[in-house]
Amino acid sequence: MNDIDFILTELRSISEPEYLKKMAHFGIDISKAFGVRVPNIRKLAKQIGKNQELSLLLWETRFHEARLLAIFIGDYKEVGEAQINAWTKDFSSWDICDQACGNLFVKTPYFKSKAFEFAGAKEEFVKRTSFVLMAEAAVHLKKEPNETFLSFLVIIEREAYDNRNFVKKAINWALRQIGKRNAFLHQHAIETANNILAQNNKKANWIALDALRELNSDAVLARHDRL
């Protein structure tokens, strides 16, 4: 199943008009979308298997579901810095950004340098990529040292003023995930949230207050007590 036209036809055949409306409701760019549920795209990806060459070709079609499929069949071991840069510049939807970060980018040796680099970007989804990488790293990279996340907290505090919807939600996500990683980082995440509140910037308050609600919850505190 390596024919692009065949794959696009297959995606169209499993599309659902009502799901397309649901995608739009959740802020997903549907300007080039069919309306295919993610589990169905993953099922198709499983049939195809890992195929980096096909992944790159699917990405170039610019169709939303084709790009999700490209992410799912991509081989992170073959993803280089140039691909990360190119794909990130193409992001126009939060779900594409998040899936690329979680399935591919965070598994590469470049995740940390890109988190730093993209944090100061002007483009909303490029900047979101920075903080999604931080959040995904906090969840999935079990061997990553605390020092990495301490350096991320500095950036989170610095960039918390950015009130653009898809940026602030990613910053908040990163702060919460870092704080839930272990008791040591929990303490520093709490401190970071309080430092954000001390900025007296109304645009930054939501990021801090929402994070503090979760980080101070009984569930999170009990989890750290058990560790």
Image (cartoon, rainbow, N blue to C red):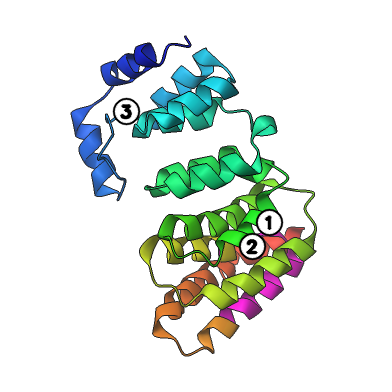
Whether residue 75 is visible, yes or no, is: yes
| Mark 3 Cα-neighbour bin, 10 Å: few <14, some 14–19, many ≥20 | many
Looking at the rendered structure, the secondary structure element under dot 2 is helix
Disc 2: which residue? 116
- Number of marks in picture: 3
Magenta span covers which residues? 176-194
- What residue is drawn where x is 52% and y is 54%? 129
Looking at the rendered structure, the secondary structure element under dot 1 is helix
Residue 212 sits inside the magenta stretch: no
Q: Quadrant of residue 74?
A: top right
| Mark 2 Cα-neighbour bin, 10 Å: few <14, some 14–19, many ≥20 | some
- Viewer-side residue, 107 vs 140: 107
Query: CA gap, disc 1 to disc 2?
Result: 5 Å
Q: Nearer the viewer, mark 3 or mark 1?
A: 1
Report the amino acid beneath label 3.
Answer: Val
Please give left or right for residue 60 compared with residue 193 in the image. left
**CB within 8 Å, label 3 to label 1:** no
Disc 1: which residue? 113
Percent x, y for residue 29? Answer: 30, 45
**CB within 8 Å, label 1 to label 2:** yes
Judge whether 110 appears above or below 198 on screen: above
Q: Quadrant of the C terminus?
A: bottom right
Disc 3: which residue? 36
